[in-house]
Image (spheres, grey):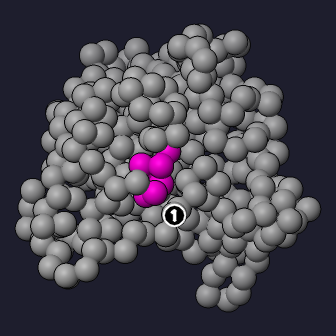
Amino acid sequence: MDAQDDAVTVDGAAGNFAAEVAYWREVRSMSKKALAELMGFHPSYVSHMESGRHRPTADFAHRADTTLNAGKAIWRRWGEYESARARQSTPAAPPMPAPRAVEQPYATGSAIVVEHDAARLDYDGHRYRLTMRRLLRNTGTAPITRYLIRISVDRYPGDPERSNAHYRAHPLTWDELALTATCRGEGMRWQAKHDRDAFKEVWLLFDNDQGRFPLYPGEAVWIEYAYTVSDTKWGHWFQRAVRLPTETLEVTLAFPAALDAVVWGTETSMTAEASPLPSAPARRDEDGKCLFTWSTARPALHTRYRLEWRFRAQPGQDMTQGEFT
């Protein structure tokens, strides 16, 4: 625990704990229900813990850390929470934070459908540039003013202690990510929701300094966002998680042809372990790059698609992970 922990409030420490649990659950490709069952809790308990409706407990922290093989990362967040509670000197019990609906983080009455989800990953030999284009439709009764995205990486997925140490020494930074977002030709402001060493959650806002452009009921609009990650923090596979109803999901990977890339993929659902993708990614060559494209229609909610690759021209490289949603 470092000197910055002295400034963490009880609410802030509870939020950090919730984000740490969510991060490791995502890394392990596990649903909230599946994690709760493995930990011996009611299926809704993990959801309540991640949303802030329940405060962290030592029992939950220990079971979650063990079940998710988090290398004591979740347990350390519990320690930070306990330290923050001990520092709090107000005579009255602190008020509980207002509930935060993780399952539906948008406005009451809103409902987003992703009509087309197109992701492209470009690698130049040193950096990955990820570009996401989504056609969003508001099928609800209230305007939508923000959209949640996640960036999650794991340098050594089979060795959590080593991975945690790597990101403590080399955390993802906002400067290197260089996140940009647009909608209707307008730049979108963004706000960080969670900022961990290897995990970011960000609200893309339907406004900027010149005005607001909410997504009204019945309307559909394309948004695009992009960011950059070094290959020392991203790596040789990434995972797409379907969290909203989606009509079409499409992924394109673009690598320098000289690297002689080989690509394959797996599909994981809430009811089945990882299995090969139902169809192989299609390959084509274009302007010195080798492009691999894969798509599917109407993917089931909570399904995860993972594309992996290796460069035959660079044998013996580490297999590392990245996810964007």
Say which of 275 and 83 sits in front.
83
Q: Above or below — where is 167 with respect to 71? A: below
Q: Above or below — where is 266 with respect to 112? A: above
User: Picture quarter containing residue 311?
Assistant: top left
Tell me the amino acid under the disc marked 1. Answer: Pro
What's the residue at 70%, 44% (across, down)? Answer: 244
Say which of 251 and 139 sits in front.
139
Residue 249, image x, y percentages = 72, 35
User: Picture quarter containing residue 180?
Assistant: bottom right
Mark 1: give few (<14), some (14-19) or many (20+) Cα within 10 Å.
few
What's the residue at 42%, 19% (across, down)? Answer: 310
Instruction: Name the residue tied to disc 1.
Output: 99
Query: Which quadrant would the C terminus be assigned to in this image?
Result: top right
What's the residue at 71%, 87% (across, down)? Answer: 211
Residue 201, image x, y percentages = 47, 56
Q: Which residues are magenta?
A: 47-53
Left or right of residue 110: residue 81: left
Disc 1 secondary structure class: loop
Residue sitting at the far front: 92
- Asked if residue 49 lies in the magenta stretch, the reply is yes
Query: Which quadrant would the N terminus be assigned to in this image?
Result: bottom left
- Asked if residue 12 lies in the magenta stretch, the reply is no
Residue 321, image x, y percentages = 39, 32
